[in-house]
Image (spheres, grey):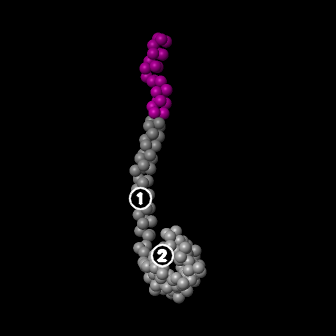
Amino acid sequence: MSKAAPAENTENNPPKKSKKKLIIILIALFVLCGGGAAAAYFMILAPTEEASQEKVAEAEVVAPEFVTLEPFIVNLSAPDDSRYLQVGITYEVNGPDAVNKIKHFTPVIRSRILMVLSQKNISQLVNIEGKQKLMDELVELARLTIQTDNPEDRTKGIRDVHFSSFVIQ
């Protein structure tokens, strides 16, 4: 009878290793599924979040407004002091606050523009690079004039400057 007892023991009690293998396989499957779900989230939903952030940034962009100054006529500096420059200047600004600031400071801006223009000569103004440099100077001049306590506001107010006419005679 002693031989029959061990045989019954093995039939009723399956080996414990198979339960451990099953638990390890289930845990591995759970980890893989979780990793796949995380990868799918970042690949599918993350670009959607970036797109929504871009839409928010686009919504923050304010449509430009334009402030046209009266035309300027100045004598050019030596050696071209017998010639003059006639130029129309329009500032491109962000919103009504910047328009109001430009209008409020128009006398100061006009005075400073006249000083800058009267220091130029033909060789500085006939090529594109010279005109672009002048545009950069005029933008910075206006930004400095309407400067506020917050430096970020200063650069956001004035976007650009445009010439509506540019005649050298």
Q: Which residue is nearer to you in this view: 7 or 20? A: 20
Mark seen at residue 51: 1
Q: Give the amino acid at mark 1.
A: Ala
Magenta segment boundaries in residue numbering: 1-25
User: Is residue 10 rendered magenta in the image?
Assistant: yes
Q: Give the amino acid at mark 2.
A: Val
Q: Seen in the image, is 164 located left or right of residue 82?
A: left
**N-terminal-most mark, 2 or 1:** 1
Across and down, in percent, residue 19 comes to 46, 30
Above or below — where is 1 with respect to 24? above
Give the prevailing secondary structure in the magenta stretch: helix
Q: Quadrant of residue 7?
A: top left
Name the element at disc 2. Answer: strand
Across and down, in percent, residue 29 comes to 44, 37
Q: Is residue 45 visible?
A: yes
Dot 2 corresponds to which residue? 161
Across and down, in percent, residue 106 comes to 51, 86
Mark 2 or 1: the one toward you: 2
Mark seen at residue 118: none
Above or below — where is 158 with respect to 104? above
Q: Residues within 10 Å of mark 1 (few under 14, many from 20)?
A: few
Q: Seen in the image, is 140 located left or right of residue 14?
A: right
